[in-house]
Each structure stands twice: as structure tokens, then as C-alpha cells.
Image (tube, rainbow, N blue to C red):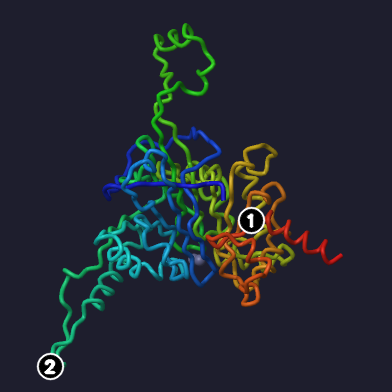
């Protein structure tokens, strides 16, 4: 996986930023994040854990800090252990396969991180329900029986599960305070609206801002006199801060929710929705796009495609029109530096090799070589066996590169011939 992410953190606060979103995103081929663990199966569980790589200046210090972690969604999955250290969790929506391990996570994180309360970004409309569940879980957790056994009671709100809940609306932006890469880069998260068949649902992007002392790219080739002239005329020539969208997460959504300029007409958008639309566009320019994909068979008839819309999920035949609407199918070098991770596969397309065959056949050719798949959840018992080809392709984070799979399959077929 090309993108890698690192963090060190000091305090835990999030601030809603008032600044307007920047449309000028400077892209480079590197990010600060890596996928530590990705386990996902539609209707069963989804949990994607990112880890920040260690900055060179941090690596020199003697005291080793744990790498910072964040997670998208908190379903009950086999990668829960990797998710425990996530200080920030971004919840896309309230379906149980995406939030089922939320309260276990709060407890496990506090136990493992010196009592620290993790921060959960939750769709604002779901906040009251999540607070109710938290209260109920806390009461169950603190329920006691007296020594006589005839009287039950709870021990009160002092045992409330430690969680910082942040309500999020489309178009919101938050600084991820306490997470930095070296001394010059910090991170923020932005939320955008998607369409999950009417269920309140969000996608997220994580971006970085890096302080730089140099000139803006467009002025770097000018001589001193030209620069002086610009400065005297009031032009800001110093780069100051470079902003980059590093990771995007679609959450559960149908095609409509990811198409550029599709959810609202320009006239009907308020300021927040217009920011949300901008954030969605930025998601498709991210170095790493983590994109849901539930229906995999490109030969399926219109009825199946209609079913994907009704259930609020993506069908593999939707990808071409979605990626084209964001200019991602143009032939340029940009795609070579960017990665896409598909997750949320339906178990009906298993086992893993069968699902990968569908995906390899149905992906738009322009993006096929930059795609990975969160596939571990679909491995059959036979495929799990040591020595099976898929095991050699499987990365420690549970993903397989489509390009690697096709190369392996070609080799296997050549050997048979
Ligand atoms: Zn789901
Ligand atoms: Zn869902």
C-alpha cells in the first residue's frame, strides 16, 4: 500500500474550524498514513484502522511513542484488537455492522491507554440515540447485586463509559488536535453527505497541513527582481502552508451519493451543503480512497442494480460513471500515485478468489492497477490454509492488490497449460 500515515499526540481536543474549505489541493505522491488493518463484510462488520508512520525527527528521540491510530467505523470484527488504540473514530452511519463494537472500544481504549477517552465523530442526527445506548451500556456495566442477593442497583453515573462524542454534519471540518507529523504537519477531518437509502450517512476525508518556508509553486522559477516586484504589489508569494487530502472514506452509499454535483441542485444548497459537495470532490482526489463496493457481478441484470440503489450500496457497474464524473478515468500519471481500497463486499460473492475474479472483470481498466480489496472476510477455509496462493498475496492488513491477484492468476494458468 503506497500511502502511509504517522502521528504523535499530546492532547485530545477537536475544534470546529470556521475557515472556508480550500479548493486548491496540492497533491504529492506520498501520504503520512498506512492501512494497519481492514476487515469488512456487508451486513456483518466493518472496521478500517489507519496508522500514522513515525516522522524522522521522532524516530531519533529515545522515548518511543506508540504510533497514532484512527479508525473508520467500529463494527465487531476480527481486527478489533488493532482498532483499540484508535484515538479518533469516524462513524459513517448507525447500522450495527458499523457501530456494533463502539462501547467495547471505549472501554478497551481506556483500559489500554491510561484511562483516555477516545473521540467519536458521529452523524449529528444519531447523537441522541448513541448517548442513550451509552447510558444503557454504562448502567449494565455498573449493575451490582447486594451481598444478600435480594436488591439490585447501579452504582451511578460516575461509571459512565468514557467517550468524547462529537456531532458531525455534512460540510463540517475539525482539527485533529494532538496528532502531528514532525513539527510542521497537522491533520484535519472533513465530512460530506452521501446517500445510503435515506439512512443518515457520512463520508470523511483526512487532510494534512504542512508549514513550509519556500515559495508557492507558481513563483519558484522567477528571479529575485520578479519576486520583489510581486511582493511590493501585495502578492503573497510564500507557500506558508501546503494542504493535502490524504485519505477519504466513502461510508455506505449508493451511486447517487458519490456522483459529482448530484445530490443537490446548486440553487438548493446552503453554505454547509456546498462545502459538503466540495469535500466529496476532494475525496476523489485523495491519495488513498477507501470506497465501499457491495455488488460485484458486472453481468447482473437491472433488477440487481436496482436492488443496490434501494439498499443504498454500490454496484461494480456504477464505478465507471462515478469515477468519470470526478475526472478519475482520464489517462494521466495522477492515477499511478493514488490508491483505491474497496471494502464492504457482500458475502454472496465469496470465496475470496471468486470475489476477486468479479472485481478484476468489472473494474474500469483505468483504475484497475491502483486498486486493493479488503478481502480477508471472504476467505474460505481452503483459502485460509497455509500454502494457498491467496495467502501469499494477502497483506498483513487483510488486503490484496488486484494487480498482484491478476499476475498470480496468470502465472497459475500458464503453469497449467
Ligand atoms: Zn454496511
Ligand atoms: Zn449501512
The total of numbered circles placed on residues is: 2
> Circle 2 — which element?
loop
Q: CA distance from mark 2 to mark 1?
A: 60 Å
Q: Quadrant of residue 73?
A: bottom left
Residue 372 against residue 380 in the figure, above or below: above
Q: Residue at x 32, y 63 (%)?
A: 109
In the rendered structure, the answer to whether residue 152 lies left or right of residue 212 reads left
- Closer to the camera, 49 or 200? 49
Q: Quadrant of residue 387?
A: bottom right
Q: Residue at x 56, y 38 (%)?
A: 29
Residue 129 against residue 207 in the figure, above or below: below
Residue 50 against residue 160 in the figure, above or below: above
User: Is the CB atom of the residue marked by disc 1 within 8 angstroms of ligand 1's nearest atom?
Assistant: no
- Closer to the camera, 343 or 270? 343
Q: Residue 180: percent from the left, percent from the top?
A: 36, 42
Q: Residue 106: percent from the left, percent from the top?
A: 31, 65
Neighbor class of circle 1 (other Cα within 10 Å; few <14, some 14-19, many 20+) is many
Q: Residue at x 60, y 43 (%)?
A: 326
Furthest-front residue in this view: 62
Mark nearest the camera among 2 and 1 is: 1
Residue 377 against residue 230 in the figure, above or below: below
- Closer to the camera, 120 or 351? 351
Q: Residue 395: percent from the left, percent from the top?
A: 57, 59
In the rendered structure, the answer to whether residue 23 lies left or right of residue 332 reads left
* Disc sitting over residue 148 in the figure: 2
Can you identify the residue that label 1 sits on? 401
Amino acid at each position: 500500500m503506497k500511502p502511509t500515515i504517522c502521528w504523535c499526540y499530546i492532547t485530545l481536543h477537536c475544534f470546529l474550524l470556521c475557515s472556508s474549505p480550500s479548493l486548491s489541493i496540492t497533491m504529492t505522491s506520498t501520504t503520512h498514513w498506512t492501512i494497519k488493518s481492514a476487515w469488512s463484510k456487508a451486513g456483518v462488520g466493518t472496521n478500517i484502522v489507519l496508522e500514522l508512520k513515525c516522522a524522522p525527527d521522532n524516530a531519533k528521540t529515545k522515548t518511543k511513542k506508540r504510533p497514532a491510530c484512527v479508525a473508520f467505523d467500529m463494527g465487531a470484527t476480527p481486527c478489533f484488537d488493532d482498532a483499540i488504540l484508535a484515538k479518533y473514530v469516524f462513524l459513517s452511519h448507525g447500522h450495527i455492522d458499523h457501530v456494533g463494537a463502539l462501547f467495547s472500544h471505549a472501554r478497551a481504549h481506556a483500559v489500554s491507554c491510561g484511562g483516555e477517552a477516545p473521540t467519536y465523530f458521529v452523524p449529528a442526527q444519531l447523537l441522541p440515540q448513541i448517548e442513550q445506548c451509552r447510558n444503557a451500556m454504562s448502567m449494565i456495566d455498573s449493575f451490582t447485586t447486594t451481598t444478600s442477593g435480594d436488591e439490585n442497583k447501579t452504582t451511578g453515573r460516575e461509571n459512565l463509559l468514557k467517550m468524547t462524542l462529537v456531532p458531525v454534519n455534512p460540510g463540517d471540518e475539525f482539527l485533529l488536535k494532538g496528532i502531528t507529523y514532525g513539527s510542521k504537519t497537522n491533520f484535519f477531518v472533513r465530512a460530506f453527505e452521501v446517500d445510503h437509502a435515506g439512512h443518515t450517512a457520512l463520508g470523511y476525508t483526512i487532510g494534512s497541513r504542512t508549514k513550509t518556508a519556500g515559495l508557492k509553486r507558481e513563483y519558484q522559477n522567477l528571479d529575485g527582481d520578479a519576486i520583489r516586484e510581486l511582493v511590493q504589489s501585495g502578492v503573497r508569494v510564500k507557500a506558508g502552508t501546503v494542504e493535502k487530502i490524504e485519505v477519504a472514506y466513502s461510508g455506505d452509499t449508493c451511486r447517487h451519493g458519490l456522483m459529482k454535483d448530484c445530490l443537490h441542485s446548486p440553487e438548493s444548497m446552503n453554505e454547509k451543503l456546498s462545502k459538503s459537495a466540495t469535500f466529496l470532490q476532494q475525496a476523489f482526489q485523495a491519495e488513498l480512497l477507501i470506497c465501499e463496493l457491495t455488488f460485484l457481478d458486472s453481468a447482473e441484470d437491472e433488477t440487481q442494480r436496482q436492488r443496490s440503489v434501494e439498499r443504498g450500496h454500490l454496484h461494480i457497474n456504477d464505478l465507471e460513471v462515478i469515477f468519470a464524473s470526478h475526472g478519475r478515468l482520464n489517462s494521466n500519471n495522477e492515477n499511478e500515485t493514488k490508491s483505491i481500497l474497496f471494502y464492504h463486499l457482500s458475502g454472496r460473492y465469496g470465496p475470496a478468489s471468486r470475489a476477486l475474479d468479479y472485481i478484476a472483470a468489472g473494474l474500469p481498466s483505468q483504475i484497475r492497477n491502483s486498486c486493493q480489496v479488503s478481502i480477508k472476510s471472504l476467505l474460505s477455509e481452503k483459502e485460509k490454509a497455509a500454502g494457498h496462493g491467496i495467502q501469499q498475496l494477502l497483506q498483513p492488513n487483510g488486503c490484496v492488490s488486484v494487480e498482484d491477484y491478476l499476475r498470480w492468476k496468470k502465472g497459475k494458468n500458464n503453469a497449467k497449460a
